């Protein structure tokens, strides 16, 4: 317990990095996932095929491998640089990899939601002259989002927990990294493990509860 009190501020700073990663990646994943699902249900074969390939490849690739590829392949080998500051560059490389990874799960959740929308609504939209994108934006996606709020909540929770492997993409001082550093100095501390677990539970449990409540609140009656 003494170690937790002494190194608590250091762990808290690392945990803030996890929260920052989670917030940015959640927003980007929702945007990219919506774009991907539009590609997957597009009437244009090239877009539909590209969306399918991207989702299947990224979704079935381990996250740690994507993070390592971003740092070693894209940055070190191909010269992709977001910032001249090493930490900032590593941070945005991790954001890119995690956002793309999570977006594929958002895409699949939304695609399942689209399948719950009756085909008659899309046919009626075409009958009154709406284009594919207008139909998708005004009629299909709003209902799809309402139908998959709970699964999207699960994706966000998984994303928050996955931020603990962010150090695979660079020298990010997240909570897991800080904990390893402290353990090298003080030895393994059970209170530290428990403290970090409680910190993540304090974030993920309310999100899970809220997603479930909102899902029931906005459920579409069929």
Image (cartoon, rainbow, N blue to C red):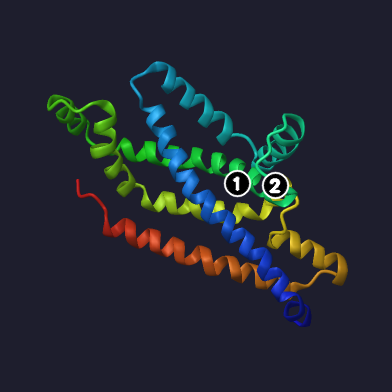
Q: Could you tell me which secondary element the residue under label 2 belongs to?
A: helix
Where on the picture, by quarter, is residue 129?
A: top left
Q: Residue at x 68, y 38 (%)?
A: 81
The answer to whether 163 is drawn above or below residue 180 in the figure is above
Marks 1/2: CA distance? Answer: 9 Å
Residue lying at the far left in this picture: please name it.
128
Of the image marks 1 and 2, the number of the one nearer the N terminus: 2
Q: Quadrant of the N terminus?
A: bottom right
- 109 left or right, relative to 158: left
Q: Which residue is more in the foreground, 10 or 179?
A: 10
The answer to whether 26 is drawn above or below residue 105 in the figure is below
The answer to whether 8 is drawn above or below residue 65 in the figure is below
Q: Residue at x 69, y 46 (%)?
A: 89
Q: Could you tell me which secondary element the residue under label 1 belongs to?
A: helix
**Residue 103 horizontal/vertical position (percent):** 50, 40
Where on the picture, by quarter, is residue 187?
A: bottom right
Q: Which residue is more in the foreground, 128 or 81?
A: 81
**Residue 186 horizontal/vertical position (percent):** 86, 72
The answer to whether 158 is drawn above or below residue 19 in the figure is above
Q: Residues within 10 Å of mark 1 (few under 14, many from 20)?
A: many
**Residue 48 horizontal/vertical position (percent):** 42, 22
The image's mark for residue 90 is 2
- 206 left or right, relative to 7: left
The image's mark for residue 95 is 1
Residue lying at the far top in this picture: please name it.
45
Q: Residue at x 67, y 67 (%)?
A: 13
Q: Residues within 10 Å of mark 2 (few under 14, many from 20)?
A: many
Discs 1, 2 touching: Cβ within 8 Å: no
Q: Which residue is more in the foreground, 204 or 68?
A: 68
């Amino acid at each position: 317990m003494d170690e937790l009190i002494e190194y608590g501020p250091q762990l808290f700073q690392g945990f803030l990095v996890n929260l920052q990663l989670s917030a940015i990646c959640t927003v980007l994943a929702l945007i990219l996932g919506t774009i991907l699902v539009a590609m997957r249900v597009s009437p244009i074969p090239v877009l539909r095929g590209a969306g399918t390939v991207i989702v299947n490849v990224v979704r079935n690739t381990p996250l740690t491998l994507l993070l390592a590829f971003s740092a070693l392949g894209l940055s070190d080998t191909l010269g992709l640089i977001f910032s001249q500051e090493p930490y900032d560059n590593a941070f945005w490389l991790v954001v890119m990899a995690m956002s793309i990874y999570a977006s594929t799960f958002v895409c699949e959740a939304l695609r399942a939601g689209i399948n719950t929308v009756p085909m008659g609504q899309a046919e009626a939209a075409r009958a009154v002259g709406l284009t594919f994108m207008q139909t998708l934006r005004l009629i299909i996606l709003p209902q799809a989002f309402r139908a998959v709020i709970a699964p999207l909540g699960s994706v966000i929770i998984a994303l928050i927990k996955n931020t603990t492997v962010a150090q695979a993409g660079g020298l990010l001082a997240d909570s897991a990294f800080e904990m390893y550093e402290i353990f090298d100095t003080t030895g393994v501390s059970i209170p530290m493990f428990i403290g970090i677990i409680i910190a993540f539970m304090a974030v993920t449990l309310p999100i899970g509860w809220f997603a479930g409540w909102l899902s029931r609140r906005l459920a579409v009656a069929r």
